Amino acid sequence: MTTKDFSKRLEDLISLFDKTISTSTHPTGFAIATVDGEKFNEARSSSLSFIKNLFGINHPYYSDFNNRVVHNYPSEASYGRGILKAIKSEIDGGWLNTMKGIVSAEIFSDFLEMARHLLSEKYKDAAAVMIGSVLEEHLRQLCLKHLIPTDDPKTGKPKKADLLNSELANSSTYNKLDQKNITALLDLRNKAAHGKYSEYTQQQVELMAQSVIDFMTRNSI
């Protein structure tokens, strides 16, 4: 889904809460107003599903919504609508993609720093596996950015890195020269992962690290 798709879905959910709030009444025998229960449950369930898929259940938006939007009271429906508006504001402002990119960059940077340390201690094999893993995850993040599926639609399993590389090149995310370079880097990673330690050198792993950094810099998430 694109940012526009997320924004449009949020508009629909906000509208659903607007319709829910418009049903507010004071039922006989009740001291407080309520809204239509069926509409409230539909709006609540749909919103929780959206927030979960977007941020995960550990995000404050999800826990806040789940804990504060529980009863079919106008005030709680309005609270839920407010959370959705806050999310929409972040998405429309580009903060969602920006934060994902920053977090990913920080994580990748930490792993690459660890790989450099391993290289300095002459642990080329462990460093090669770590650098290759960073590269593969970056390819997956690039696919998500450019709306390329990362799972096989037939099996539901994650696609292999070589296939991601091919699909990214075919979509013109980067050129064929980059594709060939990535293929070579993944091949070195696979040799390290399968114990073929004599088929590459310390210097080649050092060049691998620099190549991955250059590629990630030119093809940011």
Image (spheres, grey):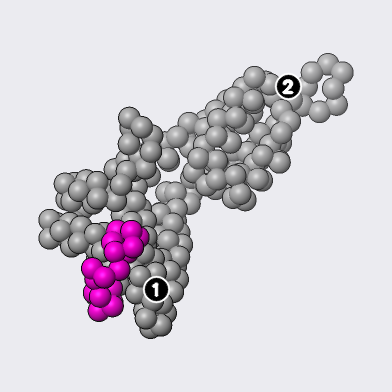
Q: Are marks 2 and 1 in contact (CB under 8 Å)?
A: no
Q: Is residue 191 magenta?
A: yes
Image: magenta residue range: 189-206
Distance from the alpha carbon under mark 2 to that under mark 1: 63 Å
Left or right: 98 in relation to 28 = left
Query: Which badge, 2 or 1, comes first in the chain's sequence?
Result: 2
Helix, strand or loop under label 1: helix
Find residue 116 and report its horizontal and vertical position in percent: 38, 78
Q: Is residue 209 magenta?
A: no
Q: Residue sitting at 87 percent across and 18 percent down?
A: 29
Residue 210 got which mark? none
Q: Which element is circle 2 on?
A: loop
Residue 207 is left or right of residue 134, and the answer is left
For marks 2 and 1, give the one nearer the viewer. 1
Classify mark 2: residues with Cα within 10 Å, few (<14), some (14-19) or many (20+).
some
Q: Farthest residue toward the bottom?
A: 120
Kind of residue indicated by mark 2: Thr
The percent position of residue 176, horizontal first and vertical second, equals 12, 56
Picture residue at 24% right of the left edge, 46% below the top: 163
Q: Please give the name of the residue rendered at 66% of the width and 39% of the height, measured from the top-left corner.
A: 66
Q: Quadrant of residue 119?
A: bottom left
Is residue 89 shown above or below 123? above
Q: Which mark is residue 115?
A: 1
In this picture, is 108 found above or below 155? below
